[in-house]
Amino acid sequence: MNRTPVSPWIGRVFILLVAVLAVTGMLQMPLAKRYYVTMVPGLGWTGDYYLTHVLHYVAAIGLMALSGYLVGRWFAGWRNRFRLSRSGIVRLAIVTALILTGAARMYKNLPDAAFGPLETMLLDLGHLGLAGALGIAALAARFSGSRAYASLRGSTRNRR
Ligand code: HEM
């Protein structure tokens, strides 16, 4: 019987989406040209802000769709059989905050959105800080051996 609710495929899709978001998010900052990444054969596209912006949005749609599916399944029955690990709760809180700050950044990009310079700066730093926090939380989970977000109720594995 499965000890975690999600199939390995869902896990892989989640990792792929977060990796695309992390890379395309970093590329929204003028990093690629400054550090000559664009000079590497085949990586010229990393300096195209419009392309990386669109890729970030496409991966964001994928992440929100996957999150919606998982939340639906959780409330439709998984929560009776599985429990979230502590590190899973921390990472879920960070991903939720990333989606909320990302959605607020999307709204800020609309022509009529009224965002002052302070709100804009706090939002930008918040989204960036959360992206870093997710990376640290993922590494901590990996090295402490408690990688699963959720495990079978009653099982002593993956409580952390
Ligand atoms: C794991 C999830 C995510 C990661 C790791 C991530 C990472 C990043 C990073 C590093 C940046 C650039 C730093 C900054 O300027 O703040 C960024 C920018 C941005 N992100 Fe995300 N992000 C994620 C999810 C999302 C989601 C779900 C949305 C939308 C709902 C979103 C929307 C945006 C927007 C609008 C920008 C600014 C880009 C622009 O205005 O061109 N992000 N993201």
Image (cartoon, helix red, strand yellow):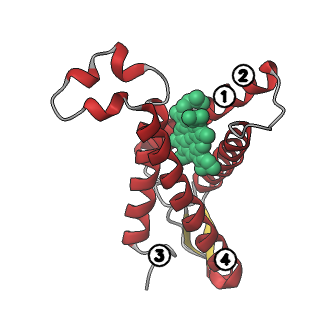
| Marks 4 & 2, CB-CB < 8 Å contact | no
Disc 3 crowd rating (10 Å Cα; few below 14, some 14-19, many 20+) is some
Do callouts 3 and 1 mark residues in contact (Cβ within 8 Å)? Answer: no
The residue that disc 4 covers is 72
Return the residue at label 1. Answer: 124
The answer to whether residue 156 is left or right of residue 145 is: right
Residue type indicated by callout 4: Gly
The residue shown at (15%, 30%) is 41
Residue 19, horizontal then vertical, whole percent? 41, 46
Q: Which residue is mark 3?
A: 3
Spatial separation of the CA atoms under disc 3 and disc 2: 42 Å
Task: Report the Cα–Cα distance between label 3 and label 1.
Answer: 38 Å
**Secondary structure of the residue carrying numbered label 2:** helix
Q: Earlier in the sequence, mark 3 or mark 2?
A: 3
Real-space CA distance between mark 3 and mark 4, rounded to the nearest whole angstrom: 19 Å
Q: Up-down: is 149 above or below 20?
A: below
Q: Residue furthest top?
A: 34
Query: Which of marks 1 and 4 precedes in the sequence?
Result: 4
| Ligand 1 lies in quarter | top right
Q: Quadrant of residue 8?
A: bottom left
How many numbered discs? Answer: 4
Q: How far is the residue under mark 4 from the one under mark 2?
A: 34 Å
Mark 4 residue crowding within 10 angstroms, few (<14) / some (14–19) / many (20+): few
Spot the residue most to the front.
111
What quarter of the picture does the N terminus occupy? Answer: bottom left
Q: Nearer the viewer, mark 3 or mark 2?
A: 2
Mark 3: C-beta under 8 Å from nearest atom of ligand 1:
no
Q: Which residue is mark 2?
A: 121
The amino acid type found where label 1 is placed reads: Asp
Residue sitting at 46 percent across and 49 percent down? 18
